[in-house]
Image (tube, helix red, strand yellow):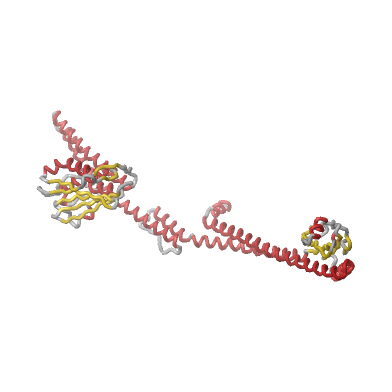
Amino acid sequence: MFSKRGINIGDTLSFRLAVIYAGIFALTSLLAFSVFYYRIHSLTMSQVDEELIEEVGEFAEISEEDGVEGVRGEMSLEIEEEDPKEIFLRLYSGDGKVLASTDLSSWGDLPVDREAIGSALKRENVLKTLKLPTRDYHARTIFASIGPELVLQIGMTLEDAEDYLQIFRNLFILLFLAVFLLSVFIGRYMGKKALSDVEKVTHAAREISRGAHDMRVDVGLKYREVRELGETFNRMLDEIHVLIEGMRELTDNVAHDLRSPLTRIRGSAEMALLKETSPDGFREMAAGIIDECDNLIEIINTMLDITESEAGIMDIARDEFNVSDLLSDACEIYRPLADDKEVSIRVEVSGGLMFSGDRRKLQRVLANLLENAIKYSHQGGEVVLSASISESVLHFEIRDNGIGISEDDRPHIFDRFYRSEASRCESGIGLGLTLAKAFAEAMGGGISVVSSPGAGSVFSVVLPIMV
């Protein structure tokens, strides 16, 4: 049980944040201590070196005034004032011969460093740190010239300096451990505090997954990033809710629109079974069933195209074509329908207008708009197609002087299966404008309408030129 609990705690983000905080603190503390300790060590050794150099200067003055005998006398006085375990002095000739020395019994075997003596004769002070086998502490020594062919070596124990530095190290270790443990607890607390808002979002998501679809995240959260996460989460939930409602509405519409042709197909089959029908009758029934199946296939294919367009997964081709030819071809296809209603079609576009885009999808958009314009035009009316390009955008307009669209119907004409009262006398499934809008938006453009009852409608399509 304890092991499982430990694993669970280790998997939490708050615990990992606490570890990260503590780790960063440890590294920065060690770095700061290293720099500080290096500085303290350098200052301590500098003080020792300055003291040795000062001693050498005093002996140089004595050597200049009283010669070797004066130096020897000063060495005796120096060792009487100082503990021989803390300082030693040796005087060398230029060839490395020891001319005078204090008591070295407590310093162990100190060999003659001829290399240092040679450097000192060149007026270069030689400072070294010695590790003595008989001592627990290091010693700092200097070789310096104090006269012609005279080199003085002064050594000083670093016991006080090293004890001071050791106290500093021990104090830092204690402080580091105490503050490190404190940083773990503070990091743990800060991590839990920072993630408390995330837990609220998680709680809301958990409740929504259990069926509370109307629940939303409280956006009055403390931290801006988590507040933005909550707002984005709520927007996503709103969009999902709209999508679910749209799917429910779509399902209802599909069920309604598919029920009629399926009922007719079933009725035709039942009549064929109940009545003695001639071969011609069976052919007529089969033809009717084929027509109804074609209608069903058209509805399904159109719905699939709309879904792919709205989901952003439809492939968009890039063709280079003449806009005038495109409009002329559309007019020729629907001219028989226009002639039946005695509606004239006119194209207003320059012959050299070129466009780069998906020709096939644009044809379907124009076909649906043109078919609607002809359907709802009065007998003897006129439909005008126009196109222009400005600032790398293609503008289409389809104008008619037909029955128009009421203000109540206008916001819904692009909805799936929507048909106004005025349009129910005409054939159709209520997906043409929905498909036109979906294709236009899939190509990066849009579609809009301006209309009033009895005065006709103007559908405008804008599409960016693909590059």
- Can residue 137 be seen in the rendering of this structure? no
- Residue at image position (15%, 46%) is 345
Examine the rendered structure and indicate whether residue 55 appears above or below residue 296.
Answer: below
- Residue at image position (86%, 63%) is 91
Instruction: Give the farthest residue toward the front.
Output: 148
Quarter-of-image position of residue 140: bottom right
Q: How many marks?
A: 0
Front one among 73 and 60: 60
Q: Position of residue 433 (x, y in %)?
A: 23, 48
Q: Position of residue 133 (x, y in %)?
A: 82, 56
Front one among 373 and 181: 373
In this image, 189 relative to 460: left or right? right
- Residue at image position (34%, 45%) is 313
Q: Position of residue 350 (x, y in %)?
A: 21, 47
Examine the rendered structure and indicate whether residue 32 appears above or below residue 291.
Answer: below
Q: Position of residue 186 (x, y in %)?
A: 56, 63
- Can residue 377 be seen in the rendering of this structure? yes
Quarter-of-image position of residue 288: top left
In this image, 159 relative to 10: left or right? right
Front one among 460 and 253: 460
In this image, 271 relative to 94: left or right? left
